[in-house]
Image (cartoon, rainbow, N blue to C red):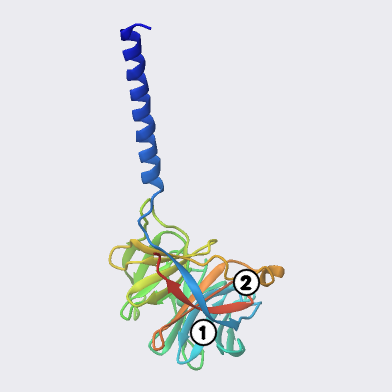
Amino acid sequence: MSKVIFTNRLFRIFILGLFVLLGAVLVFSCNSDNIPVYTYNIVNTYPHDRDAFTEGLVFEDGFLFEGTGLLGHSTLRRVDLETGNILQIRELSAQFFGEGITIYGDNIIQLTWQSHVGFVYDKNSFELLQEFNYSTEGWGITHDGTRLIMSDGTSTLHFLDPQTFEEIGQLEVFDDHSPVTKLNELEYVQGEIYANVWQTDRIAIIAPETGRVIGWVDLRGLLTAGDRSEPVNVLNGIAYDADNDRLFVTGKLWPKLFEIKLISPG
Ligand SMILES: [Ca+2]
């Protein structure tokens, strides 16, 4: 082998190696994610109505409040945490598919999926006080103390005035790579927005100022194989008891509701 051929071959191997290295760096940087992923400990397990197609969940005044969906099955409920018993219920007209709920002051606000109408009830009597309209689909709703925060199944959250229900702002939610779509049930927890991502076992923790996902909660494994012996639907339902710092999660048609504590990664 002449010296020239040997040098050429060496050069080709060097270039090939360089490309392989560059490729590896690219793949690694695309897959690496800087967003922390939290896991959980189960603190308590409570019964949950297997017929509740959970679309909204709130904890207030020592009770769970739950909004359920499906046409002809949509309700607003006050539920006893310990027993899962329904203490108070209001059925929606069969034309409405109930969605998220939130409690603002003395009122409960409930969205509907594709009817572009929201309902305002008295928190104690469940009496219907008012209806309001919005242009998007209705999925989840929560509030930050001054603004209602609503999801519509996309990556956009809408801020609404809690008195007029006019839209006063929007927030685009994104992670390190792209917009995060299918944002569903919401809960405002200590200055951050928690959002179930529809059809996943994940909750996105969103910074309200920027829309950036600052944490993921991986809730895989909450239900046992036995729990899944009868049909269950997706994880959906986050409620926060601010007075006692308790976080509750459940799912559509799930037999159980869980109080969990998040575990920081590392
Ligand atoms: Ca909620």
For disc 2, the neighbor class at 10 Å (few under 14, some 14 to 19, many from 20) is some
Name the residue rendered at 32%, 81% in the picture.
145
For disc 1, the neighbor class at 10 Å (few under 14, some 14 to 19, many from 20) is many
Of the numbered discs 1 and 2, the one sitting upstream in the chain is 1
- At mark 2, the secondary structure is loop
Q: Which mark is residue 71?
A: 2
Of 34 and 132, the residue lying toward us: 34
Name the residue rendered at 34%, 29% in the picture.
18
Residue 32, position in %: x, y?
39, 50
Q: In this view, does 253 lie above or below 32?
A: below
One can see residue 124 in this view? yes
Name the residue type under label 1.
Answer: Phe
Q: In this view, does 126 lie above or below 10?
A: below
* Residue indicated by mark 1: 65
Residue 226, position in %: x, y?
69, 71
Q: Residue 78 carries which label?
A: none
Side (left or right) of 66 relative to 173: right
Name the residue type under label 2.
Answer: Leu
Side (left or right) of 209 relative to 58: left
Q: Extreme top residue here?
A: 2
Q: Are marks 1 and 2 in contact (CB under 8 Å)?
A: no
The Cα–Cα distance between marks 1 and 2, rounded to whole angstroms, is 19 Å
